[in-house]
Amino acid sequence: MQNKSKRPILAYALIAVLLLFAVIYVIKPFLDNKPTPKSNPQVEKPKPNIPQIAVPDFNSDSAFLFVKKQVDFGPRVPNTPAHKKCGAWLVKEFQRYGFTVIEQKVQAPYYKGGTFNGVNIIAQYKPEAQKRILIAAHWDSRNEADKDTKDVNKAIDGADDGASGVGILLELARTLHNNPLDLGVDLICFDLEDNGDDDNNAPETWCLGSQHWAKNLHRPGYMPYYAILLDLVGAKGARFYKEGVSRQVAPQTVDTVWNLAISLGFGEYFVNENGPGITDDHVFVIREARIPMIDIISMPKGGEHPFGDHHHTHADNINIIDKNVLKAVGQTMTAVLYQTHNGVL
């Protein structure tokens, strides 16, 4: 007699074996979140160690007070008591923040006759450091308001044209004192910049202090990593276009500074457009010292004068100064210093 029960038993056993195989070799790897033998898992690469750059805050209130202090001395016209007193104060301020200061005497002819006695104030942070950044401005003011309609022969305060740039330099010095970094910085206040011939094409009558420095560098073979000039950097409505000479000699520095300023939120002031070339201190530094210096200078469009309607008038007083503009320029310069120190720029 044939045993019919063996067939379903064998079938059930076969099914059980197949289910066990499926659990062990197919389902279990997924449950364990493990790759199957055919998978080719990628090992996660370590993320690059991107440095976090700590850039100190630039205090525009302090910078404004530095501008006001200069203006309070009176017009800083060469050969006047106000000029001499302000110069002495500048030296002491830089020294107060631990800078080594060189007073470079300058004697240069005035195009109307006589001789100007000036001084370039060269404030050095960590003078022993090889890698250096130069930021400069002029500290004298014009002896006449030749673009004004009244008191044309009287000297102007030069709050924007001169004092604003120096105010930023002084605040940078204070920032470096409070937030040390391993980088050489030279903050130079050029003298005798602003009393040239504005009626004729006579560029050599301007920027007498920087002309002298460029021919008589304070250290042999001096060549900074960056060289930046600040001029007219504090007035309401300031707009900084990429100055023509700067673009020719140092286009990468121009782009670096403008891109940095825009990334910091100051695109309203640092306009990403080209501007004309002008005669300023940087031209003579480039020509005589072969240092590719760029110029950050306000040239707002739409006014009667290319440098603003207050330029070379009595309106260039402390009331024209805007702390927001000082902040934009000063914070950008602070970022240049500290990001260069950290190898980002």
Image: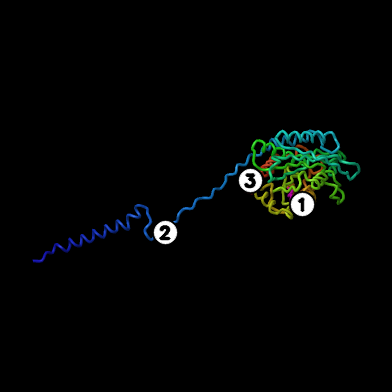
Q: Nearer the viewer, mark 1 or mark 2?
A: 1
Q: Is residue 143 visible?
A: yes
Instruction: Inspect the image, locate mark 1, and give the three-letter code of the amino acid beneath it.
Output: Arg
Q: Is residue 328 visible?
A: no
Boundaries of the magenta span: 289-295
Q: Tell which circle, 3 or 2, labels the residue nearer the N-terminal end.
A: 2
Instruction: Inspect the image, locate mark 2, and give the three-letter code of the amino acid beneath it.
Output: Asn
Most distant residue in the left direction: 1
Image quarter hosting the N terminus: bottom left
Instruction: Inspect the image, locate mark 3, and give the three-letter code of the amino acid beneath it.
Output: Gln
Residue 293 magenta-highlighted:
yes
Report the residue marked by disc 2. 40
Q: Secondary structure at mark 2?
A: loop
Scheme of colours in the image: rainbow
Q: Nearer the viewer, mark 3 or mark 1?
A: 1
Report the residue marked by disc 1. 290
Report the residue marked by disc 3. 339
Q: Is residue 178 above or below residue 279?
A: above
Residue 113, percent across and down? 91, 43
Task: For label 2, count other residues whose C-alpha is less than 10 Å away and answer few (under 14), some (14-19) or many (20+).
Answer: few
- 145 or 45, which lies in front? 45
Look at 86% across and 50% down and name the residue there: 202
Residue 34 falls in which quadrant of the image?
Answer: bottom left
Q: CA distance from mark 3 to mark 1?
A: 25 Å
Residue 91 falls in which quadrant of the image?
Answer: top right
Q: Is residue 291 left or right of residue 336?
A: right
Residue 329, percent across and down? 69, 43
Do callouts 3 and 1 mark residues in contact (Cβ within 8 Å)? no
Residue 142 magenta-highlighted:
no
Q: Secondary structure at mark 3?
A: helix
Look at 84% across and 39% down and name the residue there: 78
